[in-house]
Amino acid sequence: MNGSEEGTTPHVVGWLLSTVGVLTAGGVLWIAVRSLRRSLRASRQVNEGRILDARASGAASLNDATFTFGLGIAVLIVITAAVMLTLNDSVIQKTFLRWDLMAASAGDVFAAFGLNIWIAVITEIFVLAFGLLLAVARLAPGNAWRPVRAIAIAYVDCLRAVPAIIVIYLVGFGLPLLQLPVLSDLPPEWFAIIALTLTFSAYTAETYRAGIEAIHPSQWSASRSLGFSFGKTLRFVILPQAVRGVIPPLLSLFISLQKDTSLVNIIGTMDAFNQAKFYSSANFNLSSVTVVAVLFILITIPQTRFVDGMLARGVSRRGRKGSK
């Protein structure tokens, strides 16, 4: 089939490129003309001795020129991607974006994706609790708690050093071999939850610790001077402040956790990626895997924007406090 036949992907992409190209060229030309007019106005204002007005016109002209340059780069990237999509008889589109295969696999892949979400949510609950316990153990004061601190530090260092996929493999295939009551009889998804909890609790512990240590020492001193114990100071004074400060990085960490749920397929868990691989093997095509990628994008990008919004509000709030 000829790639330029009507109704084919190359034909549709070519039509879109032509339309967008014409509209973009018109927009770029209009902005370029406006930039030239402002530049000429700036020259005229300099000759008239209106230096401040000339500077304003020059700045506006430079802004238009910079915007035109940035728009040109963006259009170049989009066109390059579109051309790559249609090259060599659309081999990229046929390998990754076969709409019929994507539609055929979407139902089963989406249903299996629910397992990824379930694993992520349950793991996040365990990670929040276990990570906080590790952080508190690492900050426990006095010589009596030194062995506990050493164990917590060793755990955090080791689990952050080992890739998550190795932990999943060791837990998923190791626990059944141990023949332990209850633990060895768990289904694969619970092995995945255990492995991800072990890994991400180490990162969460360090996030908690950073938030706790960011609280000014005077908070500790004031609380202890009132007769609060270390535990009560931590519970009623320090943690409420620390947790508010670490919510954005914790959310970013959980976004990474959601993506890493795709690793659990190595222990036989029927998640979205594993389901997509069955379709991929049956059709010798990767379009079903693209469906998985799209699903992760759809749940990750809104969370990322939410985290960015929280960070921006935090910066704005600190700015208002600093200006008072």
Image (cartoon, rainbow, N blue to C red):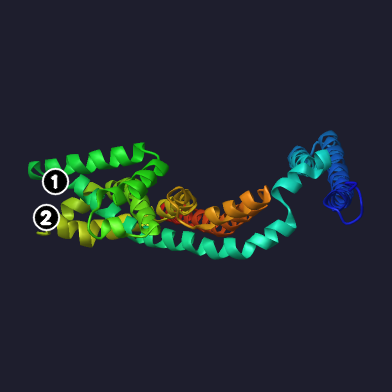
The percent position of residue 135, horizontal first and vertical second, equals: 25, 49
Task: Find the distance from the CA under tag 2 to the CA under tag 1.
Answer: 16 Å
Disc 2 residue type? Ser
> Based on the displayed image, in which of its 4 quarters is residue 68 positioned?
top right
Q: Secondary structure at mark 2?
A: helix
The percent position of residue 178, horizontal first and vertical second, equals: 25, 49
At horizontal 55% and vertical 65% (from top left) the residue drawn is 111
- Residues 169 and 38: in front is 169
The percent position of residue 60, horizontal first and vertical second, equals: 76, 43
Q: Viewed as shown, does residue 191 lie left or right of 292?
A: left
Which numbered disc, 2 or 1, marks the residue closer to the eye?
Answer: 1
Mark 1 residue crowding within 10 angstroms, few (<14) / some (14–19) / many (20+):
few
Would residue 191 be visible to someone looking at this image? yes
Q: Secondary structure at mark 1?
A: loop
Classify the position of the C terminus by image quarter: bottom left
At horizontal 90% and vertical 46% (from top left) the residue drawn is 2
Disc 1 residue type? Pro
Disc marking residue 141: 1
- Residues 161 and 133: in front is 161
Q: Viewed as shown, does residue 25 lie left or right of 78?
A: right
Would residue 64 be visible to someone looking at this image? no
The percent position of residue 161, horizontal first and vertical second, equals: 35, 36
Q: Viewed as shown, does residue 275 lie left or right of 207?
A: right
Disc marking residue 225: 2
Q: Viewed as shown, does residue 64 lie left or right of 186?
A: right
Q: On screen, 115 above or below 153?
A: below
